Each structure stands twice: as C-alpha cells, then as structure tokens.
Amino acid sequence: MNTIPEKNFLNATRGWKSWLFTLDHKRIGVLYLFSIMAAFLVGGVFAILIRLELLGPGRNLMEADTYNQVFTLHGAIMIFLFIIPSIPAALGNFLLPQMIGAKDVAFPRLNLASWWVYILGSIFAVISIAMGSVDTGWTFYTPYATETQTSVISMTLGVFILGFSSIFTGLNFIVTIHKMRLPGQTWFRMPLFVWGLYATAIIQVLATPVLGITMVLLILERVAGIGIFDPAMGGDPVLYQHFFWFYSHPAVYIMILPGMGIISELISTFSKKRIFGYTAIAYSSLAIAFISFLVWGHHMFVSGQSQLAATIFSFLTFLVGIPSGIKIFNWLATMYKGRITFETPMLYALSFLFLFTIGGLTGIFLGALAVDIHLHDTYFVVAHFHYVMVGGTVMAFLGGIHYWWPKIWGRMYSEFWAKIAAAFVFVGFNMTFFTQFILGSQGMPRRYYTYMDQYQPLHAFSSVGSWVMAVGFIIMGVYLFHSIKRGRPAGNNPWGALTLEWETTSPPPTENFVETPKFSHGPYDYDKNVPERTI
Amino acid sequence: MDTTATLFLPPGGSTIAGEVDALFYFLVYASIVMFGIVLAGMIFFGLRYRHRQGDAAAPTAGISHNTKLELTWSIIPTILVVIVFFWGFNVYLKMNVVPKDAMEIKVTGQKWFWTFDYPEGANTVNELVIPAGKPVKLLMSSKDVIHSFFVPDFRVKMDVLPNRYTIVWFEAKREGTHNLFCTEFCGTGHSSMIGTVRVVPEREYAEWLETASNVGSDLAPEQYGERLFVSKACVTCHSLEGKSVVGPPLNGVFGKPVALTSGGTVIIDENYIRESILEPQASVVAGYQPVMPTYQGILKDREIDALVAYIKSLQ
Ligand SMILES: [Cu+2]
C-alpha cells in the first residue's frame, strides 16, 4: 500500500506567506500552475463567447465592438498569460531541478521574482479589461493600435512586464542546466524534456527583449506622439509587423519546444522503450530554436514586403518544418517493439501526434507562397495555429499534467474520468477546428463579427464542438481538484519511469531527494535491467 | 471556364485560380498520404506492441537509432518541400508580374468601405465592375488603418496601406459576381467592409463605364441622392428608421437642432450637411465617435447637392 511521506514540500512550512514568498522551485511551479489555470479559464470563457456569437450571422449576443474586444482578450490572455508560461514556468519549474538531480534552480530568488512579475503583468492586463478593454487583436497592429480609443497602453504595458517574467525563467534555466547537473549526467544523458526547456530558454532570452522594445515604442507613439509606426506621424506600419513577428514567430517555438520535450518523455515511458534517435531529437530542438529566428516574414507575405524577402522567408519556413517532422518519425519509431500501455498521459501523447501532424502539414500550405496568398488571414490560419498550439502545446501540457500530477500531489486522479475527459477534448477539438480549415479555404476571413450565410453551417458546427471541448475541461477540472485531497496515494513511481524525478518520494521533500541521488542509469534505459523500475 | 467549387475551395474565377488550386490540391493529397503514414504507424504499433496481461516486464529492445532510416525520413520530406517551395514561388511570380496591357483602377480602402476610381472618371463604392478576359491592375491605398483586399474566387489578396501603394492584378475569366472581403482587422465595421466584383462582357463594360461616368444627369436630385446614399455607403452607418447605427439616423432631421460634442447646438441645414460630408470632424454630433470619413475628393459637387436634396426630402 502506497503512503504519502509525512514530511514533503507541500506541508514543510505552513501559512500563505510560506507560499507567496517561497524560494522552493516546486512551490513556485505550483503557484504558476494555479495562475496559468486561472488564465486558461478566463481565456476559455472568452473562447466560448466568441463561438456563441458566431453561431449565426448578425448579432447573437453582443455588439461588434464587444466582439472585437472579446477575441482580442481571448488571444492575448491565452498567448501571454497562459501558453507561454504554461509548460516552462509551471511544469519546467517543478521538474527541471529534480530531473537533473539538483536541490533547486540556480537563482531561487530570481525564480520567485519571475512569478511576482508575472502577477504584476497580469494585473495590468486585467486593468486594461476593466478600463474598457482592447480591440486590436492580440497582434496590436499599427496604425490601428495607435488610433483606437481602447486601453492599448495598459495591455501592452502588461505584455512588456510579462516579457521579463519569461526572460527571468529562461535565464535561470540556462544557468541551472549548465551548472547544476548531477555528476555523471552529461549533456546527452539528460532527459529530452530538459533539452526542450534549454532550447526554449535560449529563445526566451534572445527574442523577448525585441517584443519588449516594440511594446515600449508603441506606448511612446501613443503617449508622446513620436512617429514610429503611424504614417500620420511619419512612421511605418510595416516596420511594426517586422518587429512584432521577430519575437512572435520564435515565440511559437517557446510554446511548442517544451511540449515536444514532454512528448518524448511520455512516449518513451508508456512504450517502455529507449527513445529512438535521442541525439537527433536533441539537436533538432536546437536547430528549430535557431532557424525560428529567421522566418518571421512568413506572416507578412501580403503585407507589402518585397517579393524577394517573401521568397527567402518562404524557403526558410520550409527548412524549419523538417526538424519537427523528424521528431514525429522518431516518436513513432520509439513505439516500435515497445510494451505499450494507454494510460491518460499516453492518450494525450497520441492526440498530440495526431493533431500536431495535421498542424504541421497545414503549415506547409501556408509556407507555399501562392497558396498562402489565398489562405492568409482566413480561418485556415486560425485552424492551423490552433492545431499547433492546442493540438500541440496544450495536448502536451495536459499529458504532462496527468503524468506528473501524482508526483506533485502524491495522489492519483480517477483514470476512468480522465479518459472520458480526454475523449471529449479530442473530439470537441476536431469538431471545432477542423471545420475552420474548410471555412478558411472557402474564403471566410478571420476576426469577423458577422459573416455571409453560406458559412453558417460550418460555423454552427464549430460552435457545437467548442461546447463538447468545454465539457471535457469541466470534467477534468473536477477530478483533478478532487484528487488533490482525496485521490489514492500514488507511490513514488506509478508509471515505472526512469528519469530522476521518479526516484524521490511523491510529493518530494523540499530538498527534492532524501539522499543525494547518484547517476546510475540513463533516462531511457528500458533495454537494461534497472532495479528502480520495480519501485 | 470557371472552375467549380470543391470541398475546400470556392469556384475559381480568375486565370490564376486554376494554378493555385492545383498546388493546393497537390498539398491536400500529399498531406493525406503523410498523415496516413503517421496514423497507420500509431495504430499498428499501438495494437501490435500493446502490453498484454501477463507479459513479463522484461527489458525491451535497445534500438537507439538507425542512420539509414533517419536519413530516409529526413531527405524525402526535404525533397518534397523543396518541390513545393519552387512550385509556390513559380505561381507567386505570375501573381506579381503585371501584364503590360492591364487596365488600371485606383482602389481606396477606408473605414469601412472600398472606393474604386476609373481613369475615365467613373467612381463606385463597394462595387468593382470589370470586363471579362482583360487583365486588371489595382493600385491600392488606404485613408486610415491597414485593410486588405481579398477576392476568394480570384485567389488574390493584398494589404492596403496608408503610406504607400500596393498592387494586385488579375484577369477574370467570364461574367459573374464575386465577393470582396477586407481581411485585415480594421475595427467596428471590419466584417461589413464587403463589396462585390461584377465581371461583365467587354461591350457591356464600355456601356457601363459611359453611363457611370455621367450618372444622374437624367434623374431628379432626390432620386439621384437616394441612389448615392446606398452606392456611397452612407447606409452602412446611417439608418433611415430613426435607429442609431455607427452614426445618427438621418430621417426627419433636416431643420432640427442637434447637440455637438464641442457643446453648443446647430440647426441642420444645407450647409451643415455639406460640411458634415466634406469635413465630418469639424462638428461632431454629441454621443457619437468622430469616425465618419471625409468624402472630400470622392463626391463631386453635383453628388453632394443630390445627397443634400435627398436628406432634405426625408421628412
Ligand atoms: Cu478593413
């Protein structure tokens, strides 16, 4: 019979101060986890409102101006408050030190600061909602963002501040991975999730400052009337787009790379198989990180940038697709000759493979110049990035949550309900977003409050899908929270995994390990007889 | 002939549409094959290697990599995407090289309508009339924020910017009407910034151009004004049933006082209406945003007169 260790990081100290000012990376990870879940809930409510409004053409629920604010808030909250911090700041924080056998991250205070800065940035975002909201879309394109009457400043200031929280986390992770690995754990013996976090951290540190600067320039333009982007003041609106996408394209990889790391862990653990092509996966993460800085112009094929630039960006875009494709084949090959079980985390990993493949393939459509001209700024693009961001990152995140939940709380959720919820989310997701590929290629533009009758059946179907997905998430919320106190004790290593975090108790003690761990086997040595496996 | 609509694509109405569609459907089929491979792998491995009750928990095969296999699945997709790149680039080039004999029309985007100016003097709002079988070049710019000119049936799209001209060209294959959408978010009326492209036979086009260049000469001013009220997009913001849309309703207002944001009131008379049309920001009605575009340069004097007469007649 499994038991919960008497002393663990959850009960080591008590009182709200011991949480809000904790330096323990695990507690900071948990703080982040609750924060991003709250953000996800708010962003999700906005998503449901969008789909309700789009149930039929014309006004259903709100006025055009309200609708424009709702889709802006959905995007801004989901991107900046949820998905960017989701995997690195919540799961990464909790796991990174344990996976490399360290007691904490390199800079615990910086780590706490990152969470507080995140909260501060979120407050500005919330203030902007209270002050009449923003209606620019999450991209804040100028000159619209310079002219609109809505509270752009508060929101962009929020985004600026949130950037620092992201940079802090990235910086911390880079140093931690370089300096704090257990003796014997060389670079190529690290779990692939750690590689994913490492590649992500590089982008966070190098790209986020550009977003920060762009936001400051936008604020200066609005407040001080300095013409940078607005042609009415002598600026250039396309310059804004270059700045914005210089960050926001790499940011796509801030979102997906850690997710890919999780998938490597899940597929290997639940196939009980050595990961296929470890080095290829590790290097492809780095390759993606670097090439991702060179493709921003593919968001701008019809923006008026030069045809030569568009051509070069198109070519580079195809290059960045290849490492992602390679990873998919590696994961498949890992399943070959494995001993596969289908617990909930594995279901999410398989959903990821299914959905992310579609997301990736439709990316090829958008990279091809002539085809993108037709598809740009239609629902095809909306569908594509939801397949990548939700089908990819969120599925990986959910897989990770279900995988490490027993490590965090020491208790297990109901497997039965978890499978039901996973099914709802998967089916609902495809209903909602596959239809949008067809809507888009049929010509339905994005960010439309109302639309022509011919698009109605598909829009309505998509809205129904969003309800199915919502049911899945509600079930998930219930059984997850229920299990925190009521779940049955999970034991140290419920999945029989080989990475280091499973060698300590669940939940772990504050110092992570009772005794200093020794590096005795690689993270994927399922082909060897490893004694820990039977724990 | 126009291509017909398919599951994914609307009917193709331009000479370039067929080429875009060919690449699009090549990608659809190639994607189905690739996706099929991944799905088949998942299902097959999942069934074949699933853990069965009573299986010993023995170590599994230690396959760490296989260079030949990895090279294969790196090189084949690379070749495929290089083909797709060149294919897409090739069609893109054709989209960008404007034929020398293309007729030119000036397009202006502004919140939230499109204006088309023909060199012969005609100008239309939200309706682009073009002859079939002739290349048309649009020289586009915006008066405010960024808009984007998108005709799905023609497979063309181009942003319309406030500080420079952008160009798009196409050749419609035969008569018909096609939707024109704005695809760059531009505020409240973004989703109603919709127009039509009407393709007519060449002879009919010449006739249309002739009348469009001096319309109204045969109509009473009120009737002409009534038409302009629709064709110049006043209706998108002004109701005639007393409702307030983006702007105030315009029925029964003539001769009445109206409060302004600057304080003060004015009586709505001919000069005030004229000023409202040409310099809308000069006196803004209380309770409304100053979003009415100026019609300076869009409306001729004769047209303004007709609009004034029409609004006057709405008692
Ligand atoms: Cu527009």
Image (tube, coloured by chain):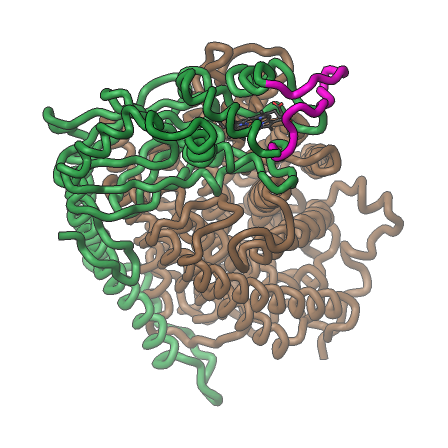
- On screen, residue B110 versus residue A408, left or right, reads left
> Which lettered chain is shown in brown?
A
In front of the other: A221 or B173: B173
Picture quarter containing residue A307?
top left
Residue A197 lies, with reference to residue A525, above or below; the image says above
State the predominant SS element of the stretch in magenta: loop
In the rendered structure, the colour chosen for chain B is: green
Residue A95: tell me if it is visible. no
Please tell me which residue is depicted at 73% across the width and 45% down the height of the picture: A24
In front of the other: B169 or A18: B169
Per the rendered image, the range of residues in magenta is B250-269
Q: Is residue A530 magenta?
A: no
Q: Position of residue A218 (x, y in %)?
A: 56, 21
Picture quarter containing residue B45?
bottom left
In front of the other: A154 or A493: A154
- On screen, residue B302 versus residue A420, left or right, reads left
Q: Position of residue B190 (x, y in %)?
A: 49, 38
Residue A312 lies, with reference to residue B36, above or below; the image says above
- On screen, residue B216 versus residue B311, left or right, reads left
Extreme-right residue of the structure: A15
Residue A335 lies, with reference to residue A237, above or below; the image says below
Q: Quadrant location of the N terminus of chain A?
A: bottom right
- On screen, residue B310 versus residue B182, left or right, reads right
